[in-house]
Image (spheres, rainbow, N blue to C red):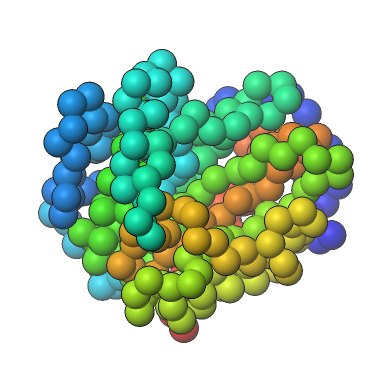
Amino acid sequence: MAIGLTLFAACGVETAAPPAANPSIPGTTTVLTTLPQPSSAPGAPSSSVPPSSSRQSKTGKVVVLDPGHNGGNSGRPGEINKQVPAGRGKTKPCNTTGTSTNSGYSEHAFTWDVAQRVSEALSAKGIRVVLTRQNDTGVGPCVNERAAIGNDAEADAVVSIHADGSNSAGAHGFHVAYSAPPLNAQQGEPSAKLATALRDGIRAGGFPTSNYLGANGLAPRADLAGLNLSTRPAALVECGNMRNDAEAAAMSSEEGRQQYAAVIAKAIADYLAA
């Protein structure tokens, strides 16, 4: 594996704040609140959806980054457990709390930090970045609302960032999910190309593909609401297994998170340039 041993040998839970947004960089980082079908159900966690911005991309490209889960989800079970549309005639809970490393570093903190770093890298290239949540202390948004943000932004790419929590012995590696069978044209070839570009880029950065989910780093899925409900090219990256000691160490370190972010950002940029 191309990643140096020092990265995976890191230990401890690193909680350093992600890089702050720089208003002088060419792109912008924003989030939309005007959803095509905003939730009106009582108790809907709409307050966690961040404010919008009218600033435009310098390249004409728009990327929606969806950091999985949220830090306030565990304290609001009534809200995150309510059923919402999940596509294919199904429903599922609004959201979940996510997983964590064995030492307690949470998936929601990891995804928020990595998304901020990816956002900064893409914004520096003049790409407009839209985030589905504004912080790591809110509740939701629900999975259907997250999909609607990408649709409403008319995103050129929607990338959901997650980490897995398998207790299977030896389970490690990343995989990239995409909607299959596709429900619309954008879920077909465009989403498959995005998933493949992410797989290729992350693997080229030295991260191993999953040995327990998907095949060769790709996982066609019919059960993920954010992918099922998307009308834009969309993929979900499971960066690795937080219950694997080596991968947990990487995810818990600032160096490891920066490396995950760098390869994801490059893969997205390569996809947009193709």
Q: In the depicted view, which residue is nearer to us: 70 or 125?
A: 70
Farthest residue, direction front: 89
Farthest residue, direction top: 75
Residue drawn at x 64%, y 42% as measured from the top left: 164
Q: In the depicted view, which residue is nearer to us: 59 or 149?
A: 149
Residue 65 relative to residue 235: left or right: left
Residue drawn at x 37%, y 29% as measured from the top left: 80
Q: In the depicted view, which residue is nearer to us: 270 or 22?
A: 270
The image quarter in which residue 107 lies = top right
The image quarter in which residue 201 lies = bottom right
- Residue 29 in the image, given as x and y percentages of width and height: 30, 50
Residue drawn at x 22%, y 24% as measured from the top left: 43
Figure quadrant of the N terminus: bottom right
Q: Is residue 99 above or below residue 158?
A: above
Is residue 128 visible in the rendered structure shown here? no
Q: How many marks?
A: 0
